[in-house]
Amino acid sequence: MPLLVMKFGGTSVADLSRIENAAKKVQQEVERGYDVIVIVSAMSGKTNEMVGWVESTSKLYDAREYDAVVSSGENVTAGLMALRLQEMGVPARSWQGWQVPINTTSVHGSARFIDIPRANIEAKFAEGFKVAVVAGFQGVSAEGRITTLGRGGSDTTAVAFAAAFGAERCDIYTDVDGVYTTDPRICRKARKMEKIAFEEMLELASLGAKVLQTRSVELAMRYKVRLRVLSSFEDTDETSGTLVCDEDEIMESKVVSGVAYSRDEAKMTLLKVEDRPGVAAAIFGSLADAGVNVDMIVQNISEQDDPSDKRAHTDMTFSLPTNQVDRAKQAIDEATAAGKFVYSSLVTDTDVAKVSVVGIGMRSQVGVAAKMFAALAAENVNIKVITTSEIKISVLIDRKYMELAVQALHDTFELDQA
Ligand code: ASP
Ligand code: MG
């Protein structure tokens, strides 16, 4: 039997009628001749509510109990989905992570897959079940404790099952009808893409386009799982939504295929850091130890304003999420107090945003950066930090110009045209 994985996000199973609506989509695929593994999220809002309960009960909570609590939302939707399918005459049963078993590491709150043995579920398909409804986001550790995969983890569960079972495709049903060239809320001309390459989706996901959990895209790329993002609120067929696939499947790709942004960025600059081997390791090691998520890093040569001072100095600028600024300051204070490095002053700017253009076509095309910078210049947007990778160029700019920048770049690279 050909097999499909269908994943329904929180808004797609938010109440009983939406579960019924999702179940109808599953039934359609069964009628087309598929065995189906359905992965469900918790009803929207439920996981947040439970995280709140845990945090209100225990400030320094035991992560094993956190997982025991917050994984439960998916158990509810898995059981309800199986019941609804049974009511519709579709042979289905639910599976919690430990029953499959979905074996993971013991890193509670952000566990990783070890393996997903197929035997139990396959035995049930062989008995005549058509659908296995699996609770997303959860697994079981070698110690026999329930684990969770990190927020948004059901996407990753879905891809992992598609890889483990060799599914024909992994359909991710959500509340948007696909992946757009940029956020339609800030750019009216945003266009839904028919296809996008794994690498591009990975960049867009990690740059703040919140359609898919980044890890799920990494996994899909590694195992070449064709992913489709589509709406559970519309009538859909094989051609709906956006296909995330290998670049070989995309005939003609544009130089730039999407514009991403992230609003909550901050920039910190350590001025006049003593320039010697090991200083960057000391700074970024201390920040990493404190759990600070550093993104862009720029090191400058700074002027030697005192000629009698023989030591060289440099300025070190980096970006980080706004809500980690205090933690970063504390880590820097502690590291300097411990004599790990010295600097003259610290400048913090919490009103910045990051805007990026992404496209695999950039690998073979010159002048993309120049075109991007010219477009920003034409709008009088000042660039504060620039970083590039093979298929992406990111700039840090004042947050108040973020939407303007996204729109200008979308126009410049003609992303509204297919
Ligand atoms: N329910 C989990 C969360 O809200 C997992 C998911 O929905 O993907 O993060
Ligand atoms: Mg999600």
Image (cartoon, rainbow, N blue to C red):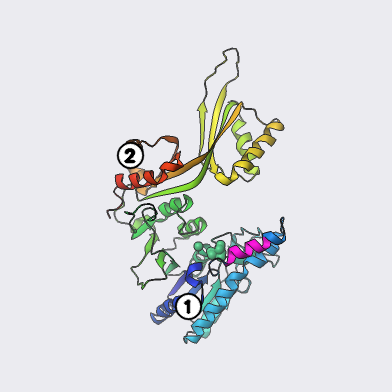
Q: Residue furthest front?
A: 400
Q: Is residue 51 magenta?
A: yes
Residue 275: give its label: none
Q: Quadrant of the C terminus?
A: bottom left
Which of marks 2 and 1 precedes in the sequence?
A: 1
The location of residue 331, given as percent across then percent down, is: 66, 39
| Residue shown at the point (46%, 43%) measured from the top left | 353
Pointer 1 residue: 17
Residue situated in front as seen by the camera: 187 or 251 = 187
Magenta residues, dominant SS class:
helix
Amino acid tagged 1: Ser
Position of residue 412 in the picture relative to residue 33 (left or right): left
The answer to whether 208 is drawn above or below residue 320 in the figure is below
User: Which stretch did the figure color magenta?
Assistant: 46-54
- Dot 1 falls on a residue whose secondary structure is helix
Tell me: residue 318, above or below residue 143. Answer: above
Q: Position of residue 354 (x, y in %)?
A: 46, 43
Q: Quadrant of residue 25?
A: bottom left
Image label count: 2
For label 2, the residue is 375
The nearer-to-camera label among 1 and 2 is: 1
Q: Residues within 10 Å of mark 2 (few under 14, many from 20)?
A: some
Q: Quick one: quadrant of the N terminus? A: bottom left
Q: Is residue 85 or residue 390 the one in the foreground?
A: 85
Mark 2, secondary structure of its residue: helix
Residue 201: x percent and y percent? 42, 54
Q: Is mark 1 within 8 Å of ligand 1?
A: no
